Amino acid sequence: MTRPATEPTDARRPPAQRVVSLLPSATDVLTALGAGDALVGVTFECDVPAGLDPRVVSSTTLPEGLAPAEIDARVSAAAAAGEDLYRLHTDALADLDADLVITQDLCAVCAVDAGTVGEALAHLGTDADVLTLDPRTLDDVLDTVATVGRAIGREDAAAALVLDLRARLDAVVRRVAGRPRPRVVVLEWTDPPFGPGHWIPEMVELAGGACVLGWPGERSRPTTFDDVAAARPDVVVVAPCGYDLAQARALADDLVERGVLPAGVPVAAVDADAHWVRPGPGLVGGVEELSAILHP
């Protein structure tokens, strides 16, 4: 049975004890709730705390070591061909005895022949419940914390975590109140450049900036470096999806060396994986990080 993120868990349904997380952000939420030991399966992209050893149940068709332009080309080609870049293999979950699978789009990620969730579960060898998460805004992200908490019987821990995250956001808003708002361009990709979408424009506003070239609640979109210059940014933030801080710094240095960014504009690299692109508790750290960049 599929349970959307907006639908409360049936009160008669027992809390999930064995969870497969097909979303790195869901893995982050589970560990933040102290439920990491419930994980029996994760993706190759998930960050799992030391001492836990869930099975890695997914793989990618992307080779390692590709440059951003090469990744973009392969992603575009796969999308045009109706192919997926991530794959769960036949019977991947067959002996995990999972009672809950958390995913964004199970049918798209598991197999070409799985057109429905039921077909996908049969392909994977499990009859577990499915919880689908697809947050678009910061409020949506915080709602998913509560949703996951209900699904695993940790409502109180989830409520406490959400209260703490909101308190941290409120503290940032109070600190930057009344200050000038720098114009900020966030690059979610660098070759080609992509402006930010989903929750990132909100993050910029909460941190005391004015997000330009951003589309709140929508997908990020390709742009051009001419458009970046025309936006007259005071700061450019390099937050490439899937990249950590060291990798983002390398890409930021490359943009500066190529001279494609507006001259004299400060460029900040951030740990996109930890604090920007995964819709989980780490986003609040991104707001705090950006507020320190914009208003030291």
Image (tube, rainbow, N blue to C red):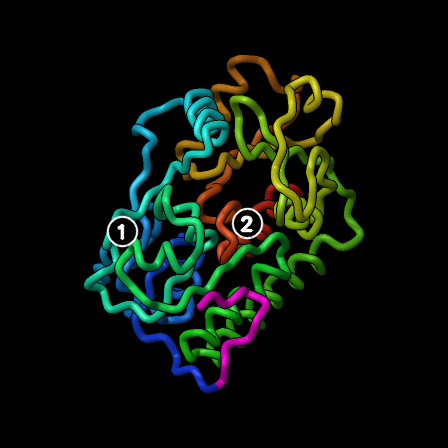
Which quadrant of the rendered structure holds the N terminus? bottom left
Within 10 Å of disc 2 (Cα), the crowding (few <14, some 14-19, many 20+) is many
Dot 1 crowding, Cα within 10 Å, few <14, some 14–19, many 20+: many
Instruction: Name above or below for residue 247 compared with residue 132.
Output: above
Q: How many marks?
A: 2
Provide the residue designation for mark 1.
Answer: 57
Is disc 1 placed on a helix, strand or loop?
Answer: loop
Q: Position of residue 189 (x, y in %)?
A: 53, 30
Q: Which residue is mark 2?
A: 286
Q: Nearer the viewer, residue 23 or 165?
A: 23
Who is closer to the viewer here, 82 or 37? 82
In the rendering, at what x and y percent does residue 213 appear?
70, 33
Q: Is residue 139 above or below residue 69?
A: below
Q: Nearer the viewer, mark 2 or mark 1?
A: 1
The amino acid pointed to by label 2 is: Gly
Q: Is residue 141 magenta?
A: no
Looking at the rendering, the stretch of residues picked out in magenta corresponds to: 1-11
Residue 2 in the magenta stretch? The answer is yes
Q: Quadrant of the C terminus?
A: top right
